[in-house]
Amino acid sequence: MSKIPVMELFGPTIQGEGMVIGRKTMFVRTAGCDYACVWCDSAFTWNGTEKHRVRMMEPEEVLDEMVALGGNRFNHVTITGGNPALIADPMARFIDLCHQRGYRVGLETQGSRMQEWFLQIDDLTISPKPPSSRMETDWAVLDRIVRRLHDDGVNLSLKVVVFGDEDVEYAKTVFARYPYVSQKFVQPGNELVTEAKDISHHLLARLAWLFQVAIDTPEFNTVRVLPQLHAMVWSNERER
Amino acid sequence: MSKIPVMELFGPTIQGEGMVIGRKTMFVRTAGCDYACVWCDSAFTWNGTEKHRVRMMEPEEVLDEMVALGGNRFNHVTITGGNPALIADPMARFIDLCHQRGYRVGLETQGSRMQEWFLQIDDLTISPKPPSSRMETDWAVLDRIVRRLHDDGVNLSLKVVVFGDEDVEYAKTVFARYPYVSQKFVQPGNELVTEAKDISHHLLARLAWLFQVAIDTPEFNTVRVLPQLHAMVWSNERER
């Protein structure tokens, strides 16, 4: 495959979560995922409902469209999915093109598989999925990926989406397993991903809950609790 | 003066804004300020209304009370005010004590004056005040402080609170003046600091406005737009 399966390409917008929260970025959302989290907020990337919208694009085409959209109003690009780690060479090429233009490149992926181009990423978030997702973490695989990225000096963060107490325990397990990763985040899950109306009140209540969990939990002393700002500001609006 | 004028000492809570947004921290809020911003959200530190609540405390006393409150549930301390930069030796001593305990120490100050202990701060935010505050920036002083902190390798950020278009222009000026400072933030101002009720809807509308300003502004390509999460979650509740 020499092309990238692009589900969405949009921006500039504001990164609403995680290690670069608040920073202006373009989003490239790839189609396809090896997971099927029950609460996935981008299930359209893998559940077939929007298969007709997927575009197979050359890395150069992705870059050109991005520049056409964003002009000089961005210098950061976020690759997300789906799971972008399913894509090999064309993504490596795309990242090279971005770097040639002086853009920083961020990646969000669950840590179920690795690509060599991970080592070229400027802001890399590994987001292992907790029990509420109904997915199983392959710890041996995750161990290898996190260790490799850390040893290579990649700017790496771990982020766990948390819906309830069982997920809190899972987050503790993840953070304790990789004590050498200094950037750690928890994020309240969005239970209303199909709701079209304003969900900010609900999301703020979930954030208040997770704030209190963190306050009470010594294991979260260095963990940062952040919401999805985009969902609070723009609800579940697509391509925002 | 060998004591610290403490207005509030509380936590653990979640840092709601700026460079360590989302991180659990204790707050030490000092009394006294050389500024009097018209929209100050902590005017009680300098306008005399709560003078009777100020406690003159030895650095060791501040540490002891903090540990009594937070136990093992924190390892980060935020010094804010008022303007903590008005305090010399006792603050240096307090920071030493915190470091001896293994705590990181953050500081928020406007950049109107400097103390040598700034160089010991782990997360330092300089927050110059825009025109809407009715304060005047002494650029020569700010230049010296920012340059000194940068040259000394302090983990430094610039944060500008923004109420309207004139403040946006001021933020551009600040960021352009110190291009070597990589961590730059804008934050929508809170126009309802005396409102006791839920102000989240208003704050989210202001955040949406500032998101759009950033999206449209090439000068904000590397600037992060962040709200005050604590005000969204807890409104103007004190000591949260």
Image (cartoon, coloured by chain):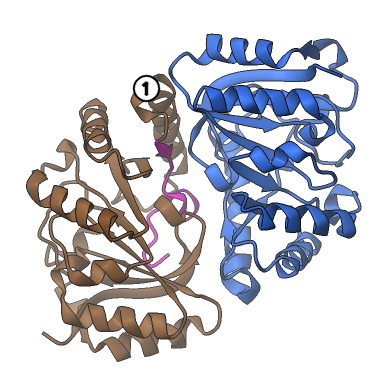
Chain colours: A brown, B blue
The answer to whether residue A15 is left or right of residue A137 is right
> Is residue B57 rendered to the left or right of residue A114?
right
| Residue A199, above or below B93 | below
Magenta-tinted stretch: A223-240
Image coordinates of residue A15 in percent, x first then y, are 45, 60
- Residue at image location 60% in from the left, 32% down from the top: B198
Quadrant placement of the C terminus of chain B: top right
Task: Look at mark 1 in the image and give the residue it sits on.
Answer: A217
Q: Quadrant of residue A181?
A: top left
Residue shown at the point (26%, 35%) measured from the top left: A171
Horizontal side of A154 relative to A90 (left or right) equals right
Report whether A166 appears left or right of B168. left
Chain of the residue displaying label 1: A
Residue type, mark 1 in image: Thr
Label 1: element kind: loop
Residue B60 at what x, y percent from top left? 66, 13
- Between A45 and B90, the one lying in front of the other is B90
Residue B59, position in %: x, y? Answer: 70, 17
Q: Is A14 rendered above or below residue B226?
A: below
List x then y, in percent, for residue B229: 55, 39
- Vertical relation: A208 (above or below) B223: above
Q: Nearer the viewer, residue B4 or B117?
A: B117
In the figure, residue A52 lies in which quadrant?
A: bottom left
Instruction: Residue at 90%, 37% (x, y): give it.
Output: B34
Report the front residue among B135 and B164: B135
For mark 1, does the 10 Å Cα neighbourhood hold few (<14), some (14 to 19), or many (20 or more) residues?
some
Quadrant (top left/top right/bottom left/bottom right) for the N terminus of chain B: top right
